[in-house]
Amino acid sequence: MTIQGPAPATTTDNGDRLDWSTLVGQLLLIDVGSLEVGIITQYGSADAVRCDVTNLDTGQVWENALAWGTVLITQLSPRQGSKVCARLAYGTAKAGRSAPYILTDPTPEDLAKATQWDQARNAPQAPVPVIGNHPTPGGTSVYQLQQQAAAAKAGKYADSEAPF
């Protein structure tokens, strides 16, 4: 048996694999991450934008996916750290090349749907009580009761003054 190093990273090793062709015409919310330069693929070295993509028409989410292609990179890389709402479409093909994927401007309805989805997903959750510091039925936290008991034990209160 020969011991070898790992194979070069490919697109399948980088987050969720996303088939962009299945998303043409769909409303997308893209949480744009970083521009990744020099990713080794089966076709050589290429650049891509790392992002989380949500299909707002189906609810499907791809995390840590890669957006390939010059046009998508050009549209997404200036928006690093932001969220982009758009519909995926085909652009105009250059001679001898396939049509690139492009992001089209959203309608006001598209923006409203994206905003509603994002707010629902990122709504603040009810705080989880911390054991030892949640309120008792009387409104005093367990922590406060522990502090008062320690003070009483240390002789801070006369027997008639202790709060319990």
Image (spheres, rainbow, N blue to C red):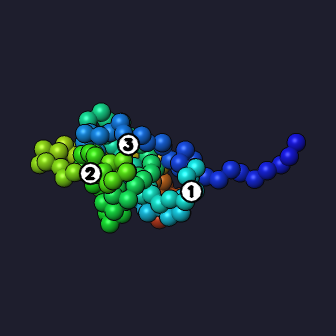
Q: Which residue is mark 3?
A: 20
- Quickly name the residue at label 2: 92
Residue lying farthest to the top in this orientation: 58
The nearer-to-camera label among 2 and 1 is 2
Q: Nearer the viewer, mark 1 or mark 3?
A: 1
- Mark 3 belongs to which amino acid? Trp
- Of pointers 2 and 1, the one earlier in the residue sequence: 1
- Kindly indicate whether the residue at mark 3 contacts the one at mark 2 (C-beta within 8 angstroms): no
User: Measuring 30% from the left and 51% from the top, which residue is drawn there?
Assistant: 93
Q: Earlier in the sequence, mark 1 or mark 3?
A: 3
Residue 44: mark: 1
Q: Nearer the viewer, residue 93 or 152?
A: 93
Say which amino acid is labelled 1.
Gly
Circles 2 and 1 in contact, beta carbons < 8 Å: no
The residue carrying pointer 2 sits among few (fewer than 14), some (14 to 19) or many (20 or more) residues within 10 Å by Cα, namely: few
Q: Residue at x 83, y 48 (%)?
A: 3
92 relative to 157, above or below: above
Amino acid at the residue labelled 2: Thr
Q: CA distance from mark 2 to mark 3?
A: 16 Å
Residue 162 vs residue 125, the one in the foreground: 125
